[in-house]
Image (cartoon, rainbow, N blue to C red):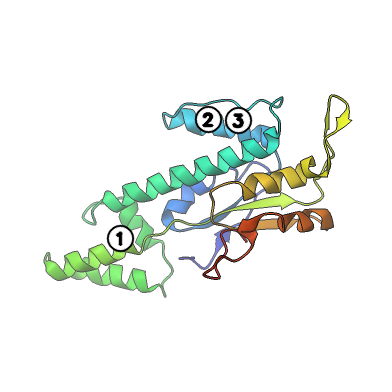
Amino acid sequence: MQHTFHIPVLGLGYSIDTPLKVAKYGISSVVSIVDDELIERMRKYHINRNGEVYNSISKAVPDSRALRITEYLNLLNRLVNKQITEIKTQDFENKNDLNKYFELLPENSILKSKFIYMKQLPQGDEKKKIQDYLKKGIIAGNIDVNIMSKVDKANYHNGIYAGEENTDALAALRGFANSNLNSSVIISAGLNQRLYAYMETFIDFFPNTEGLFTKK
């Protein structure tokens, strides 16, 4: 993390798309993935806003809850990466997101110190070298997710119990696990041993050969 704070989950909707507003500045935030209806509406909104093609995921589609969550999280990740790429094309001479990224860093940040030093230098090789170094140091804030463990309603299809893996909380976890995010899930609002046990069925929650976790 570039910052000493993050933006926590703010109910179901207040931080549903916060990463699109702050992740480009290196600030991490937490998205609730409990309400898949809201998530699908937000996915449609941001896809249309960014000129992409929206393909609806109907509730009638098998595993629709997990699929909606996965597609929305992948969209957030894709759009944030696009924002970071755009920032890196900007220059330091104008008032823009590139400068804002470093201005918002904490005072004890090495990158911010180098940024302040760079701004005082005249045009030349040293200034250009530091600018290249600063751009390489730009990373997006994490897109973390929250599951309220007690929100774990059993679901039925045509009157038949859909099974434990399709309860609300487990389907939400599956949606996160199948996404291409490299981030964390925050479990809140109670104890759900079934949900915790379900985590071990996904390889991303285990360290890779380098001892690193894709999801935590």
Please say if the residues under marks 3 and 2 sit with CB atoms less than 8 Å apart: yes
Name the residue beneath numbered marker 1: 135
Type of amino acid under label 3:
Arg
Query: Which secondary structure lies at badge 2?
Result: helix
Question: Viewer-proximal residue, 132 or 61?
Answer: 61
Q: How far apart are marks 1 and 3 (CA)?
A: 34 Å
Residue sitting farthest toward the front: 209
* Vertical comparison of 116 with 73: above or below: below
| Sequence order check, earlier mark of 2 and 1 | 2
**Viewport quadrant of the C terminus:** bottom right
* Vertical comparison of 101 with 170: above or below: below
Name the residue beneath numbered marker 2: 45
Q: Which residue is drawn at 20% across and 69% down?
A: 120
Please say if the residues under marks 1 and 3 sit with CB atoms less than 8 Å apart: no
Q: In this view, does 17 lie to the left or right of 37?
A: left
Query: Which secondary structure lies at badge 3?
Result: helix
Q: Residues within 10 Å of mark 2 (few under 14, many from 20)?
A: few
Q: Which disc is residue 153 wearing?
A: none
Name the residue beneath numbered marker 3: 41
Type of amino acid under label 1:
Lys
Q: How crowded is mark 1: few (under 14 residues within 10 Å), some or many (20 or more)?
A: some
For residue 14, which quarter of the picture?
A: top right
Question: Viewer-proximal residue, 88 or 168?
Answer: 168
